[in-house]
Image (tube, rainbow, N blue to C red):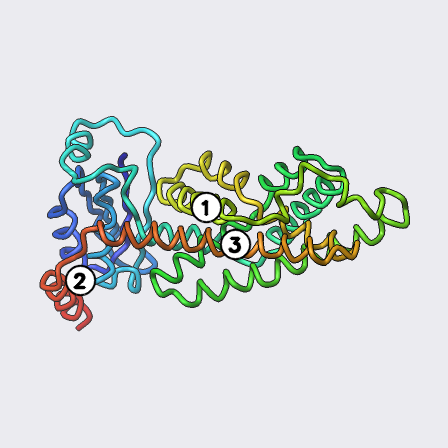
Amino acid sequence: MIAQLRICVPEKLSDAVVDCSTGEVGVAEVSRQRGASVVPPGDVIHVLLARESVEGLVEKLHVLQVQEQGSISVTMPDLVLSDRADKAAADAPGEGADAVIWDEVSRQTGEDSRLTWSFLAFLILATQLAAIGIVTDSTIAIVGAMAVGPEFGPLAALAVALVRRQWKLGRRAALALGVGFPVAMLAAAFTAWLSVPLGLFPEDVLDRGSAVDFIYHPGPYSLIVAVLAGAAGMLSVISRRSAALIGVFISVTTVPAAGFVAVALVLGEFEKAAGSALQLALNLVGIVAAAVAVLIFYRLITKRLPDAAALRLKRTALRARR
């Protein structure tokens, strides 16, 4: 897996960036265009390297404060035909699929955790689908609700915030969940309240269903499934495997549990509402805990920049500012 870095940097830092890039294991090509950047003025440097080497180079660029004076962009070309690139990928330690680019993870989860109209719309629609599946005893509708629900984004962002201590990201994710779920549940409760007098379903509908009993009967496997799903979800984010993430959505009952709480409260089934609320809480906690564990594991196995090397780069950055 090959990545390409485009680095826009002031002329004073250009040589330091080139030195860092050429000295990094797994780098196949380094090219520099002097004066190519107009705003801000400076050089543009392109680096072709193995994905597993990206984090090490980006960490050095952060120490040089390149992102404050210029920019760093990372792309993944679909096709690279180069013997040098193949050799660089072979020389780089580890595997590209296992490589973590921490800025990429933070940015991706941050974008998925914002409280936007589209996020609210998807969560409301998913909860409505779940409520329909509950009153019609339809597992197909419930599975559809699981797939539509966008709640994993904020949950993954919470895990990243806890591990990387990015509290702004954590507050944004908590806001999305704290507002999104109550609004979606109120919308589902409102439609359920309208549906009863219209005769769309009987008031004892929750006593008849069998396929949806698992939603309000939390047990050990509820937490186990949530933990497994959280670990799989974070791994899919790290490895950029969206197909696996869809499977995570379908495996957890966060949205169905929220929909069941809304319907049960409208019908006066408070015990079942409490059970489904517990199911929701178990899923949320289990997913975040497992995602945090995965991120901590990857932090432990990720090679960090030695303090001596970081100090040298800081001195270089200070000299460039003068």
Label 3 – label 2 distance at C-alpha: 53 Å
Q: Relative to the observer, which residue lies in front, 211 or 248?
A: 211
Residue at image point 49% right, 40% down: 248
SS class, disc 1: helix
Location of residue 88 with respect to 156 vertically, above or below: above
Q: Relative to the observer, which residue lies in front, 219 or 116?
A: 219
Q: Position of residue 117 (x, y in %)?
A: 63, 55
Compare marks 1 and 3 and give the one earlier in the sequence.
1
> Of the residues tagged 3 and 2, which is closer to the observer?
3
SS class, disc 2: helix
Residue at image point 56% right, 48% down: 150
Query: Residue 87's quadrant in the figure?
Result: top left
Label 3 environment density (alpha carbons within 10 Å; few <14, some 14–19, many ≥20): many
Q: Name the residue under label 3.
A: 282
SS class, disc 3: helix
Identity, as a three-letter code, of the amino acid under mark 1 = Ile
Q: Residue 159 carries which label?
A: none
Location of residue 132 with respect to 163 vertically, above or below: above
Label 1 – label 3 distance at C-alpha: 9 Å
Location of residue 49 with respect to 278 vertically, above or below: above
Position of the N terminus, as image quadrant, is top left
Q: Where is residue 312 in the image (x, y as percent from the top left)?
A: 10, 64
Identity, as a three-letter code, of the amino acid under mark 3 = Leu
Compare marks 3 and 2 and give the one earlier in the sequence.
2
